[in-house]
Amino acid sequence: MAHVELYTTPICPFCHRAKQLLQRKGAAYTEHNVMLNPGKRAEMVDRAGGARTVPQIFIDGRHIGGCDELYALDGQGGLDPMLRAQAS
């Protein structure tokens, strides 16, 4: 399986939706709570090219974007192949 990372906050409904989709797909993920760890927020902004909103999602180090982008990728049939890929 691919290595999936999410930068989230516990009060974000879009974060919950993104995690629900990944759970339905059976994908394991690492969650970084940027509310509890300001250092992770700075890391997220840097990795996401300046994006400050949550969630920010990465699959095998590739920036996917937020919840809407994750669902769009799934709708286009691109999420499942990415999740099946071997992590580098």
Image (cartoon, rainbow, N blue to C red):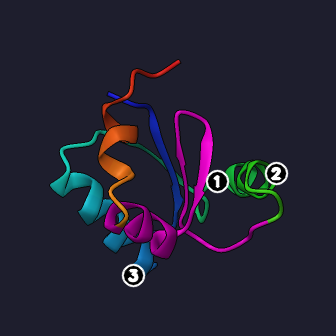
Snapshot quadrant of residue 76: bottom left
Q: Count neighbours of disc 1 (C-alpha within 10 A) and say few if under 14, some if 14 to 19, many if 20 or more.
A: few
34 on left or right of 5:
right
Q: Quadrant of the N terminus?
A: top left
- Front residue of 19/34: it is 19
SS for callout 2 = helix
Look at the picture and state if 27 lies above or below 75.
above
Q: Count neighbours of disc 2 (C-alpha within 10 A) and say few if under 14, some if 14 to 19, many if 20 or more.
A: few
Magenta range is 51-75
**Residue 29 appears at what percent x and percent y?**
37, 42
Please identify the residue farthest to the front as the structure is shown: 76
In space, the residues marked 3 and 1 are separated at their CA atoms by 19 Å
- Front residue of 75/8: it is 75
Question: Residue 37: which disc?
Answer: 1
Is-magenta flag for residue 70?
yes
Residue at coordinates 32% horizontally, 61% vertically from top-left?
19
Mark positioned earlier in the residue sequence (3 or 1): 3
Q: Mark 3 points at which residue?
A: 13
Question: Residue 56: which disc?
Answer: none
Snapshot quadrant of residue 21: bottom left
Q: Name the residue under label 2.
A: 46
Residue type at mark 1? Answer: Asn
Q: Are marks 3 and 1 in contact (CB under 8 Å)?
A: no
